[in-house]
Amino acid sequence: MGERNLREQGETNGFGQLEDKVMKTAAQFFGEDLLPYIGVKGKILTVAPTEHVHLEMRRLEEDFNFIMEKGAIRHLEFESDSITEQDLRRFREYEAYIGMIYSAPVMTTVICTSNTKVQKKELINGDSVYRIEVVRLRDRNADKVFKKLRQKIHKGKRLRRRDVFPLLLTPLMSGDMEMSERIYQGMEFLQCEELQVSADERKRMQSVLYALAVKFLSRNELERIKERIGMTVLGKMLLEEGIEKGIEKGIEQGMEQGIEKGVKQGQGRVNALIVKLAEAGRMEDIVRAASDREYQDHLFSEFGL
């Protein structure tokens, strides 16, 4: 989605930019799980560029492009508002240009987080008809996602990444479960021993949920999530950061006091960093910082933390 369009959405919907960023992050790190979950068939071969510049110096910025196994391009767009006729014209332009560059068929899937139930899928232009696929996350029920995972664990089955991937989207789905409970239980599942993923993948997924918590939850609700974070892989990383800073800065007060103070300071710094990144819509940086200590330090310097 172009920068201008993102700004327009941000002005009309306070959470629009964050929702779009969550979806882009999901596509970037978990594309192999996202496509089957939204019903897109085929195997991803690689990721394609999303920025193109015309000779007239007008930049086109798509949300995400995958080159599929058989050479076709799967173009993803993420919309937090209703799909308009102008959106369809923009998507058609993207498709035409991508198809020309790669000499390949292009299919566009729009993942929508809007509450609007009926979305535009067709654009009639003279004798031609342009169509897109629309996946509306509000049509998915978050309660069912959690129920399915509980049933798997109850049957003694192991959980794979593709099983828990939908947890990252549950705050954007419908359902009776409160938002805070979805995020809390999501953290629980991402920490369970039945889940067979790497520590880095756990941290990335936990970071996405934590960023949503920072944006959507009240202060009291967020405190509960922070308590749960302390027992996760992401939380342990924050604890290590705090201990290191405590040893560095608190030796004058005595080792024990220094470590205790450093732990609190370290957790506070990382919490503040995640808040600032979420407010700036920088979801990719939140996820990257969860598993890259050097980059985390770079972000601390950038925000003066």
Image (cartoon, helix red, strand yellow):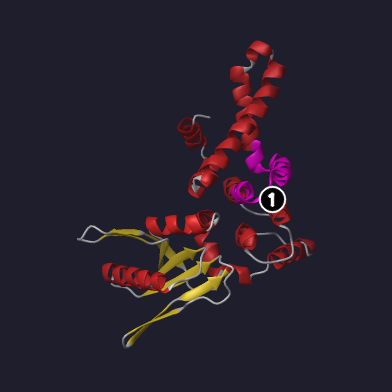
| Circle 1 residue | 187
* Residue 71 appears in view: no
Magenta span contains residue 220: yes
216 relative to 30 in the view: left or right: right
- For disc 1, the neighbor class at 10 Å (few under 14, some 14 to 19, many from 20) is many
Residue sitting at 38 percent across and 62 percent down?
Answer: 62
Residue 191, relative to residue 115: is it above or below? above
Q: Nearer the viewer, residue 205 or 24?
A: 24
The magenta segment is 209-236
Q: Quadrant of residue 15?
A: bottom right
Tell me the kind of residue under disc 1.
Met
Outermost right residue: 154
Q: Could you say where residue 138 lies in the image, as x and y percent from the top left?
A: 61, 68
Secondary structure at badge 1 equals helix
Quadrant of the image for the N terminus? bottom left
Magenta span contains residue 256: no
Residue 207, relative to residue 66: is it above or below? above
Q: Could you say where residue 90 lies in the image, as x and y percent from the top left?
A: 36, 69
Residue sitting at 54 percent across and 46 percent down?
Answer: 278
